[in-house]
């Protein structure tokens, strides 16, 4: 039972108007400065680059900071696959105010309609140069340095273990687990996980890094063993028709007390769960159930329609997340065209009480004239307002939700999330 | 790759066709690959990810696949894909080993050639008895391995190959040539040489290996005679050669490749021909010759691609990157060994974390229709 009307959560839409080809916002995070950073990605247009965007609370508008291709000396018109996006790969560095970001691939070369990392791996003129890691000083707005973190591959998701000065990432397409030593500026390939990237990494108290594999099992890197290990169990899924395959971690939000995380999976009918990674040999997983509606199980439905993302804790200590809703009969034969014209899908934000696990729908993310069912990530700024990243018809953008006064607090972004 | 002029018109059929070619044409474009996990699906768990890099394979005459893995530990396994089988059985861990360089199958026994921090060893046991049924009910045991020491303090093994009788295998170490009785594990030093790359057996039963000075040595098991520098390699980039052979069953040509990816054939008289063609990428990796004489192999590092050399057509074809959508949905990137199965299918061992056995069923070449008999 909701105790506030949805009007108590005014939603504002900020479109990436200065990047008309932007078709996805895969990364949205709070920086070490408490401000909101977003990636205006352009993966569907040949020869385009991702641009770094920041919400300016003084002007209530977006500031366009730079185009990544220019900062990392890999021009979008090079003829290679482009530095087209940042995919769940903003991570803060609190001691020095740096925001690290790593680029990802799939944007076609300027003169081709598509890019295949498998088909062009050995093509010196076409192959993606590699995921560029960039250190951005949020105190001075300067790019301090950049490096190629993963040669020839993109970075699907990134995590920062600040105590140890290490960045962890998953590569695409080979799904390898990489470690980057910031002080030494050196990367190391630990090994392959599978074929379906997990979309998130998270950290436990013992500095172990957790993610998942194709089968929906937890994969854990233990620095003491220098080895990737696989859990004996499979993450929650619907046993009616799913096996765990592709039930990889999609979005993971840390609980403010640091004892557990909340996660959703990257498969239709995504599951919400709570994971206590510090308990027992393999932690404890609580299945919090499906996040989206029942549907016709004889028809495949992609995660562009049937989706849950944007997990973030509010200043009130409740978990907020966005789950899609759609009109019965909605299909997704052309995912890129989804949301154009008639609105048959919606992005609904839910609020979950961690103490009781009760949840309620609190508001809808309304994008003028378009559907907004797909939210990739969410973040909370230092004022306690929530921001949601959208993937949909170009140009895309982000949502800002001015939270009710009793549900926000100063420095609500702390303790900060250390992964994308 | 042909590019299109800007701006792209997405309604242009040529643009759509190019898009589809880029996206879908990257993968296996003829035949079918099936990635089989290293387990009895639904009954056992797969071999641990970083212990399952498949680096050695051999097949019995009946087409049962034996092999070994490399990684944190070595596992020896048997793959059973005939009748109502469909399983990989982990025969056990070879303690203290990190690399399996070769597997050899005889009529009744199996041997694996392993290296580890404590030196090399040869591990053998009898073949796995086929269970009753892997759909209805089954029973398995793990029979103990026999361990045979390698001379010269466990000198590192480079490769091994089974002789045509199936009773013996021949292995090279860093400095020696060994003969191994597969069923007993008995080891005998039969020559001194520096092991380099993989071995092959020619149609007459002689064992061949790469020798110094761009040559091959030849060992006649019957006469126990080793001829150093017996066969000169043809002109080619042998300094960077991967030193691989196309595995085959029965008589016929042996194929190898140089550092440029040029493919050469060695006939039964010990004469080289070629280069016959050039593989699409380097280095050339594991290859095998199927029953109709076509050579299938992988080339290129990191994300390797399959190629086919058809001696009848005299050309090489790029088959694409490995992908499986049957049994497992998985990409295949790096492969460690290849062997021909009973019906000419080729089994590739995936030398990667969570390695799978990849069964490749080549495209059947359409026969020219013949007039009906009167």
Image (tube, coloured by chain):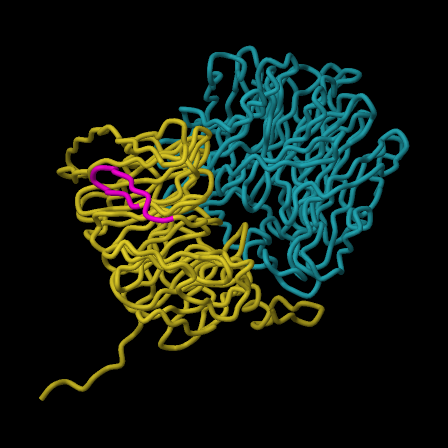
Seen from the viewer's position, the closer of residues A338 and B103 is B103
Spot the residue most to the bottom.
B374
Seen at 60% across and 41% down, the residue is A171
Left or right: residue A389 versus residue B164 is: right
Seen at 28% across and 50% down, the residue is B162
Left or right: residue B237 versus residue A165 is: left
Seen at 46% across and 45% down, the residue is A301
Number of numbered discs on residues: 0
Chain ID for cyan: A
Highlighted range, magenta: B179-191
Location of residue B231 (image quadrant): bottom left
- Residue B220, image x, y percentages: 29, 58
- Residue B160, image x, y percentages: 35, 48
- Residue A324, image x, y percentages: 55, 36
| Chain B, hue in figure | yellow
Q: Is residue B181 magenta?
A: yes
């Amino acid at each position: 039972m909701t105790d506030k009307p949805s009007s108590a959560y005014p939603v504002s839409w900020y479109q990436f108007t200065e990047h008309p080809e932007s078709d996805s916002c895969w990364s949205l995070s709070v920086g070490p400065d408490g401000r909101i950073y977003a990636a205006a990605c352009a993966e569907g247009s040949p020869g385009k680059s991702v641009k770094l965007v920041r919400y300016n609370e003084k002007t209530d508008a977006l500031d366009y900071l730079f185009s990544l291709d220019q900062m990392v000396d890999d021009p979008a018109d090079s003829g290679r696959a482009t530095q087209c996006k940042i995919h769940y790969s903003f991570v803060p560095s609190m001691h020095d105010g740096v925001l690290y970001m790593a680029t990802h691939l799939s944007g076609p070369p300027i003169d081709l309609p598509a890019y295949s990392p498998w088909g062009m791996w050995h093509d010196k003129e076409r192959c993606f140069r590699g995921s560029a890691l960039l250190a951005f000083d949020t105190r001075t707005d300067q790019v301090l340095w950049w490096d190629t973190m993963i040669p020839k591959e993109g970075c699907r998701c990134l995590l920062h273990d600040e105590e140890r000065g290490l960045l962890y990432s998953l590569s695409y397409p080979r799904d390898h687990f990489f470690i980057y030593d910031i002080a030494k500026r050196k990367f190391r390939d630990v090994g392959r996980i599978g074929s379906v990237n997990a979309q998130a990494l998270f950290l436990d108290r013992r500095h172990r890094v957790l993610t998942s594999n194709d089968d929906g099992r937890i994969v854990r890197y233990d620095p003491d063993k220098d080895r990737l290990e696989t859990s004996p169990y499979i993450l929650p899924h619907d046993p009616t028709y799913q096996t765990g395959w592709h039930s990889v971690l999609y979005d993971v939000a840390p609980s403010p007390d640091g004892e557990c995380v909340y996660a959703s999976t990257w498969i239709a009918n995504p599951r919400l769960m709570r994971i206590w990674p510090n308990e027992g040999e393999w932690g404890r997983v609580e299945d919090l159930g499906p996040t989206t509606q029942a549907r016709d199980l004889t028809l495949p439905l992609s995660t562009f329609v049937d989706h849950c993302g944007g997990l973030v804790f509010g200043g009130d200590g409740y978990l907020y997340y966005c789950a899609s809703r759609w009109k019965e009969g909605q299909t997704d034969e052309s995912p890129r065209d989804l949301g154009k014209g008639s609105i048959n899908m919606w992005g609904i934000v839910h609020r979950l009480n961690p103490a009781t696990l009760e949840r309620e729908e609190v508001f809808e993310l309304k994008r003028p004239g378009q559907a907004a069912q797909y939210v990739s990530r969410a973040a909370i700024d230092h004022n306690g307002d929530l921001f949601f990243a959208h993937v949909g018809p170009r140009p895309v953008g982000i949502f800002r939700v001015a939270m009710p006064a009793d549900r926000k607090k100063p420095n609500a972004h702390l303790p900060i999330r250390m992964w994308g | 790759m042909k590019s299109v002029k800007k701006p792209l018109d997405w309604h242009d059929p040529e643009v759509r066709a190019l898009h589809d070619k880029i996206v879908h044409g990257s993968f296996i474009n003829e035949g079918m690959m099936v990635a089989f996990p290293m387990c009895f699906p639904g009954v056992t768990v797969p071999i641990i990810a970083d212990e399952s890099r498949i680096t050695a394979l051999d097949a019995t005459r009946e087409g049962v696949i034996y092999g070994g893995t490399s990684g944190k530990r070595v596992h020896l396994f048997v793959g059973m894909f005939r009748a109502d089988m469909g399983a990989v059985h982990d025969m056990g861990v070879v303690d203290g080993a990190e690399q399996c360089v070769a597997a050899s199958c005889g009529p009744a026994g199996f041997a694996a050639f392993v290296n580890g921090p404590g030196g090399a060893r040869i591990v053998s046991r009898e073949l796995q008895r086929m269970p009753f049924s892997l759909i209805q009910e089954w029973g398995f045991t793990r029979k103990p391995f026999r361990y045979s020491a390698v001379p010269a303090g466990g000198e590192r093994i480079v490769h091994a190959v089974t002789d045509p009788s199936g009773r013996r295998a021949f292995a090279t170490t860093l400095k020696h040539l060994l003969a191994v009785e597969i069923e007993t594990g008995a080891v005998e030093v039969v020559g001194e040489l520096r092991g380099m790359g993989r071995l092959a057996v020619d149609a007459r039963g002689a064992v061949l290996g790469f020798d110094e000075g761009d040559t091959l040595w030849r060992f006649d098991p019957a006469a126990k005679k080793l001829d150093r520098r017996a066969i000169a390699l043809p002109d080619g980039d042998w300094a960077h050669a991967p030193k691989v052979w196309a595995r085959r069953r029965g008589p016929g040509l042996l194929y190898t490749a140089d550092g440029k990816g040029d493919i050469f054939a060695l006939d039964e008289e010990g004469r080289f021909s070629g280069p016959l063609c050039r593989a699409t990428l380097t280095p050339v990796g594991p290859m095998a010759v199927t029953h109709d004489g076509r050579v299938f192999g992988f080339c290129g590092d990191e994300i390797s691609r399959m190629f086919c050399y058809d001696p009848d057509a005299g050309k090489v074809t790029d088959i694409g990157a490995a992908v499986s959508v049957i049994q497992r949905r998985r990409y295949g990137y790096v492969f460690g060994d290849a062997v021909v199965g009973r019906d000419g299918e080729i089994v590739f061992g995936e030398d990667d974390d969570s390695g799978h056995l990849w069964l490749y069923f080549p495209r059947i070449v359409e026969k020219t229709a013949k007039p009906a008999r009167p």
